[in-house]
Amino acid sequence: KKKKKKVIVTTLSQRTLHKAFQLKADTMKVLVVEGEDVSLADKPWPVPSKNEFLVRVLASSVCGRFFSGMIVQNGASNQRTDIAVNDRVGGALPLTYDQSALAEYIKCPESCIVKLPAEADAGEVAAALPGCVLAYFSLHYRCRLAVGDSVLVLNGMSSRGHIICQVAKAWKAWVTASADALPQVLQIQGQPEVTDCLDISNRSLAAAAEDATAGVGFDVVVDVEPTAYTSEENKPDLDALLQATAPCGCIVTTRTDLNVAPRHTEHMVKTSKTLIFVSPDTLVSCGVQQTRFLHIVHSSIDMLAVGQVKVNMAREIALDDMPQVLKHQTLPIAGSVIVRPGTAKDTLAMHRRVPRASISLEK
């Protein structure tokens, strides 16, 4: 009996790629931002070089770094044996790349993507990854979150805040979320991952935290969505954040407007409090952190696939509509927003279609 031989061709010519993926000539649509000018441009689709993949974007975050997609072509000398043409993947682009994921096709390094399980939704992956990566990086690697720790997530119904609440709850922390407007307060009160809601719409963060913790403070205070406050007046300063934090606690923030004075340093030394500045881009861009980044993405997608993390999807925007949206509309404060290539009419149909780029021959 002759054994069946299966030959898989993964290196495809441009002509084959154009036919399989319905590429229009050698160009693709890319969102271009130059100062305040936002537009769509036709650019040559990228060619993967050594240790890179060509990826067809299925969905991306509004920031343009995190994405989910489908492998179209392998670059030269790729070391990843777990990823092949037609596989769906999720990951992020390093800041060193002169492109964003707000495009129809991208090239990305093999060290920044993982294969998606069959049950993972591509749109939810792109929406959840920014918050999941930030949660892992902040709570696990920087704060060393322990079971039973109290965590306060400011703007708990924002895109990343909502994900961080769920990750902290999955790690058995005592989660409190804050909101500075009544609609967000009502949303938080209906979330199972939140133990308590801190309403700071009509009082200061320090006063609300003192009442909620009997003057003790929270072990971890997370302030990573500064644009989600309904007004600048509601944005807490460093004094308020320190008052809301327990002795030996941590403040995690992405804010660049915090003025650290000598009195703040003296207070943190006396109470052993820690102020931690974080940026998820560090994990993606720094070579020594890439193994850690892949571990975080793997774990995040697993949590999403089994339902430990759920996305509160506020809006899906077609790439063709992005210039008008960014010029004339305000993105929602609560919930996640993703971008899908195509127009509003054909986005759903286009991403349900799975093109075949590999050729199988059996004898």
Image (cartoon, rainbow, N blue to C red):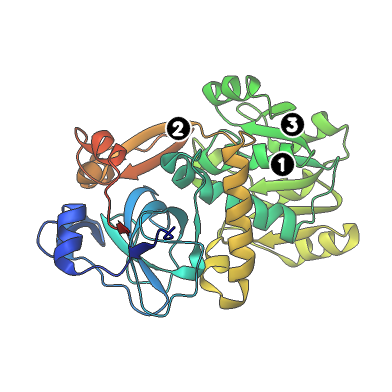
In the rendered image, which residue does mark 1 sit on?
168
Mark 1 and mark 3 in contact? Answer it, CB < 8 Å: no
Q: How far separated are the C-alphas under marks 1 and 3? A: 21 Å
Amino acid carrying label 2: it is Met
Q: Position of residue 2 (x, y in %)?
A: 41, 60
Reading the chain from its start, which is encountered first: label 1 or label 2?
Answer: 1
Q: Give the residue type that dot 1 points to.
A: Ala
- Camera-nearest residue between 148 and 224: 148
Which of labels 3 and 2 is toward the front? 2
Measure the alpha-carbon separation of dots 3 and 2: 29 Å
- Which is closer to the viewer, label 1 or label 3? 1
Residue 208 image offset from top left, x and y in percent? 74, 31
Q: Nearer the viewer, residue 34 or 351?
A: 351
Q: Which mark is residue 149?
A: none
From the image, which quarter does the C terminus lie in? Answer: bottom left
Q: Seen from this angle, which residue lies furthest front?
A: 1
